[in-house]
Image (spheres, rainbow, N blue to C red):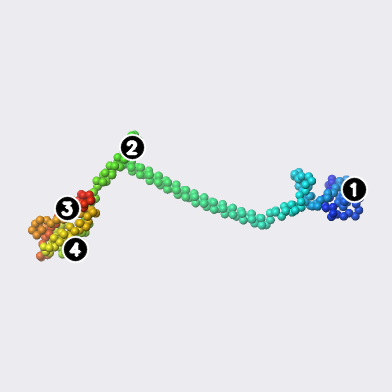
């Protein structure tokens, strides 16, 4: 297909024609006529342009998009700049690294999300456990104080029950320290040479029967028991020991049936009552 028009775009100073006619005012016109001769009937034209390549590209873009303004051709450096800023190998590498960074951030966000999800699940489990504990506590409280929805003042009923439990707790008296008394008694008897033949701790009255080697040992034991009780003051109840009246402080001898008494030993009996040390509540005695 023959072109309808042949246009030569170039710098007039770069084309020198051997002979220029009236119609061919420049070397570009001569070159246009020479090219147009190859297609008879085609129009010819010449455009003097210092940047023929850029002007041709702009005209081509304008013809395709119909957006290029007529008569305005950008300078050559602008077209060269557009070619130099196009994506190259370094730009593609930058895109790859940016994509890898985005993937790393996505993985980190996913890991944080999983961790937060597990934490929320554990928190929900603890909340459920607390709710179950609260429900169990309410059930136990309901068994102690049955409160009906028809009660006019359920709060007052609960407060009254709490006060009643506190009064009952205050009325409780701790058991007397039987083991502490026994430990103290055995400690006193350890180096006196006395023999323990009978011992009884009662709710109110306690008694002990000893076999002592002489008349001075029994009173020494009683004095040390009194001193031990004085040391315990301010802490708990204790037994106030006293000697049983009778011959030699020992009565009729007492003692455990069948006990073998060494020759020269004499009986010595003590009796005592549980008494509260000043500043402590009275004990109800040993069982």
Q: Residues within 10 Å of mark 3 (few under 14, many from 20)?
A: some
Q: Residue at x 75, y 44 (%)?
A: 67
Vertical placement of residue 149 versus 95, above or below: above
Using residue 14 as the reference point, say whether residue 275 is left or right of it.
left
Give the mark, 2 or 4, whose residue is nearer the N terminus. 2
Q: Residue at x 54, y 53 (%)?
A: 108
Residue 206 in view (yes/no): no
Residue 102 in view (yes/no): yes
Instruction: Give the image location of residue 256, x and y in percent.
Output: 13, 58
**Residue at disc 1, secondary structure:** loop
Instruction: Give the image location of residue 85, x and y in percent.
Output: 70, 54
Q: Find out whether the residues at labels 2 and 1 contact each other: C-beta distance under 8 Å.
A: no
Q: Find out whether the residues at labels 3 and 2 contact each other: C-beta distance under 8 Å.
A: no
Q: Find out whether the residues at labels 3 and 4 contact each other: C-beta distance under 8 Å.
A: no
Q: Nearer the viewer, residue 40 or 56?
A: 56
Using residue 61 as the reference point, say whether residue 128 is left or right of it.
left
Residue beneath label 2, please? 154
Q: Find out whether the residues at labels 3 and 1 contact each other: C-beta distance under 8 Å.
A: no
Give the mark, 3 or 1, whose residue is nearer the N terminus. 1
**Residue at disc 2, secondary structure:** helix
Residue beneath label 1, please? 23
Give the mark, 3 or 4, whose residue is nearer the N terminus. 4
Q: Residues within 10 Å of mark 4 (few under 14, many from 20)?
A: few
Q: Find out whether the residues at labels 4 and 1 contact each other: C-beta distance under 8 Å.
A: no
For marks 4 and 1, give the CA distance. 152 Å
**Residue at disc 4, secondary structure:** loop
Q: Nearer the viewer, residue 173 or 76?
A: 76
Which quadrant of the figure has residue 104?
A: bottom right
Q: Which mark is residue 190?
A: 4
Instruction: Give the image location of residue 214, x and y in percent.
Output: 11, 64
Q: Which mark is residue 273?
A: 3
For marks 3 and 2, give the CA distance. 47 Å
């Amino acid at each position: 297909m023959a072109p309808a028009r042949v246009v030569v775009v170039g710098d007039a100073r770069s084309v020198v024609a051997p002979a220029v006619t009236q119609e061919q005012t420049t070397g570009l016109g001569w070159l246009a006529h020479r090219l147009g001769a190859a297609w008879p009937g085609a129009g010819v034209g010449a455009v003097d342009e210092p940047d023929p390549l850029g002007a041709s590209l702009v005209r081509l873009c304008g013809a395709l998009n119909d957006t290029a303004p007529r008569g305005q051709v950008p300078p050559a450096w602008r077209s060269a700049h557009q070619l130099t800023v196009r994506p190259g190998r370094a730009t593609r590498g930058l895109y790859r690294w940016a994509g890898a960074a985005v993937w790393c951030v996505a993985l980190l966000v996913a890991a944080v999300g999983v961790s937060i999800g597990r934490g929320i699940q554990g928190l929900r489990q603890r909340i459920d456990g607390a709710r179950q504990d609260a429900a169990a506590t309410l059930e136990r409280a309901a068994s102690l104080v049955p409160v009906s929805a028809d009660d006019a003042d359920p709060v007052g009923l609960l407060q009254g029950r709490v006060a009643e439990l506190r009064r009952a707790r205050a009325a409780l008296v701790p058991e007397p320290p039987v083991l502490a008394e026994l430990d103290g008694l055995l400690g006193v008897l350890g180096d006196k040479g006395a023999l323990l033949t009978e011992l009884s701790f009662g709710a109110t009255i306690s008694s002990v029967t000893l076999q002592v080697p002489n008349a001075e040992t029994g009173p020494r034991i009683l004095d040390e028991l009194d001193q031990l009780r004085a040391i315990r003051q301010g802490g708990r109840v204790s037994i106030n020991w006293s000697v049983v009246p009778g011959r030699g402080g020992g009565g009729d001898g007492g003692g455990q049936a069948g006990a073998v008494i060494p020759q020269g030993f004499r009986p010595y009996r003590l009796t005592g009552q549980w008494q509260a040390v000043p500043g402590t509540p009275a004990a109800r005695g040993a069982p």
